Image (cartoon, helix red, strand yellow):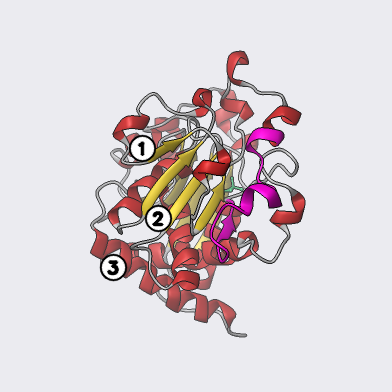
Amino acid sequence: HRHLLGIEGLQPSEILTLLDLADQAVEVSRQVEKKKAVLRGRTQINLFFEASTRTQSSFELAGKRLGADVMNMSVASSSVKKGETLIDTAATLNAMHPDLLVVRHHAAGAVKLLADKVGCSVVNAGDGAHEHPTQALLDALTMRRHKGQIAGLTVAICGDIRHSRVARSNFLLLNALGARVRVVAPRTLLPASVDRLGVDVYTDMRTGLKDVDIVMMLRLQRERMSGAFVPSVREYFRYWGLDAEKLSYAKDDALVMHPGPMNRGVEIDPEIADGPRSLIREQVEMGVAVRMAVLEALAAHLPNN
Ligand code: CP
């Protein structure tokens, strides 16, 4: 593949190859000397139309650890603010001959549209409620390193499924690798298409978490909600927030994940987020490794490689 636009379209063997490559990148990242030369002389531009802490910084570090020259386009101070369109912005950057473009945009499908217009490799860093493929890959890497393999795991993804590209990419990846996926959410936060997603649907946390291996909590994406869907925080935490009592329904060795950004006291009790079963910080470390793996895999398709 020249681009990574989603988990959709990847074969299970391709996902496993990326996870193996990411395991090697973890080792590189833990060394004192962290650099490889796979992308030496190459230019990577990170173009984020939506806020990001983890994804943007980890793509920057990943590119630098592979030897690329990395530029972060600051959309807030760019001519996008003067009305320049997505396509014109992409064409402008494309004229500077980047090799890799990492793009986050608030509209589903925008990254694919852009990929069709530029000459370089494009990575989707999150497009609306559509896909966030590197998040699903880093989640799978984190799970695999703790549980040995993805096949046979039962994973509960809880909370605001309706607005979540992370949930969608995880459904695709976990189903492809043979995990059993549950969604646990109030009806109003489930997508209309939930029956076609290949997941088991629960509307009660205690039943939904019963005997699961992994509990993945999601943030309420208030910025994507209109009035009717916005629940009160206190009520939400009481029924849907992960605390010790609800977690006790999962397996004794169940682990807790969250893609971030977290809203403590809304979808997750801080005691759980910071507790011994939380993989949340480790997910961040795996994020750099997975992005190194993706960039390295795409490097093989760059001209003159
Ligand atoms: N998980 C994730 O995508 O985080 P950011 O929005 O901070 O990049």
Mark 1 or mark 2, earlier in chain: 2
Q: CA distance from mark 3 to mark 2?
A: 12 Å
Is 178 left or right of 189, judged from the image as shown?
left
Dots 1, 2 in contact, CB < 8 A = no
Return the x and y of residue 257 as percentages of the image width and height.
Answer: 57, 55
Neighbor class of circle 1 (other Cα within 10 Å; few <14, some 14-19, many 20+) is: some
Q: Which residue bears the numbered disc 1?
A: 114
Which amino acid type is marked by label 3?
A: Ala
Magenta stretch, residue numbers: 238-258
Question: Secondary structure beneath disc 3?
Answer: loop
Is 24 left or right of 176, judged from the image as shown?
right
Q: CA distance from mark 3 to mark 1?
A: 21 Å
Residue pictured at 57% horizontal, 40% vertical: 205
Mark 3 or mark 2, earlier in chain: 2
Q: Which residue bears the numbered disc 2?
A: 100
Q: Which residue bears the numbered disc 3?
A: 300
The quadrant of the image that shows the N terminus is bottom left
**273 or 100, which is in the foreground?**
273
